[in-house]
Amino acid sequence: MLTDRSGVRFPPIRQLGPADLGNCVALSVDRGWSPETSKWSLLLEVAEGFGIDAPDGGLAGAVVLSRYGKELASVGMMLVAARYGRRGLGRALMGHVLDAAGGATVTLFATDVGRPLYEKLGFRTIRRSAAFVGRFRAKPAPADNSKMRSRPAMPADVAAILDIDMTAFGADRGQILTRLPAFAEQLRVLETEAGTAGYAAAWRNTTSTVIGPVVAANAAGAERLIADLAAQVRGPIRLDLDPDGPELPRWALAHGLEPVSLNAVMAYGDWSPRGNPDWLHAPISVALA
């Protein structure tokens, strides 16, 4: 049994599964988040969810661990029901998930509310991330002599996407990426004379269409992918970018996207850059890195 700071007893932390989707969605709504049903459904399928059952029904708290091989993992969707806040459940869930990570370096996107807890646990900030949101304003494309174009991905492109992502990310995200064709509304690859040089996806969330991941060898390639994806979206889009990046934040602003929130990207354990970080322009989601 787990006892919180006020003496209320809870069942032990347990692993969550697809049958817990409704309670996970309800927990998001309880904390003022969007329901994010499709994202929760994906996470409960490809990652490891952990939760604490509430004595009065539903979940008192939840967190998700996504593994990328044995040495790297990410944490997302760390939530405690409002009625059980500030009782130590968040710390208990984070301690459990760090134990489950088994010594892997763990990353997460932290809000200002969550960051003090993560710092106490030993996480440190490695960069920043901002959500750029709005209706994309297309502009006439300048003359392009690079012979670079994007096109919808085909089933035969999955192998190239996995290879490019491994080179960029420096760890295996195949368990998630192989589900992108079914999960995303759009999936595009970037082609040059040398072959496939990047990829990006767009998927519908509750209030916007998220464009991510975006992986390309340079900003020009990322811009082409984002613009071609955004051209098919009717409504607001969300693009999570490093606000300190040299090109894309300014480009996003020029195309009608405004930063609406700022997170700290934090790491626990032996953090060092992997792969080619400059190729990683946007994450799959702030819950997945």
Image: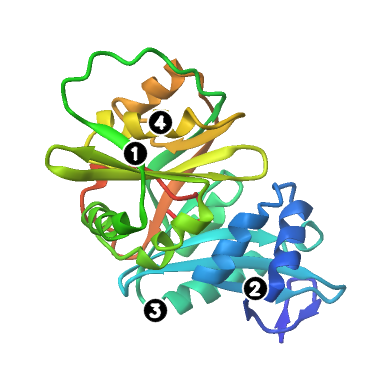
Q: Which residue is mark 1?
A: 151
Residue with the mark numbered 4: 228
**Inter-mark Cα distance, 3 to 1:** 40 Å
In the picture, the disc for residue 18 is 2
Pointers 3 and 1 in contact (C-beta within 8 Å): no
If you read the primary sequence from the N terminus, does the residue marked by circle 3 or circle 4 appear first? 3
Which of the two labelled residues, at mark 3 and mark 1, occupies the earlier sequence position?
3
Question: Residue flagged by tag 4: what amino acid is it?
Answer: Asp
Query: Disc 4 on helix, strand or loop?
Result: helix
Closest to the observer: 263 or 276? 276
Q: Residue furthest right?
A: 56
Image coords of residue 236 (percent x, y): 59, 29
- Count neighbours of disc 1 (C-alpha within 10 A) and say few if under 14, some if 14 to 19, many if 20 or more: some
Give the foreground label among 3 and 1. Answer: 1
Q: Which residue is mark 3?
A: 102
Judging depth in this view, the residue of 178 and 110 nearest the camera is: 178
- Residue type for callout 3: Gly
Res 30 quadrant in image = bottom right
Q: Is residue 165 above or below residue 6?
A: above
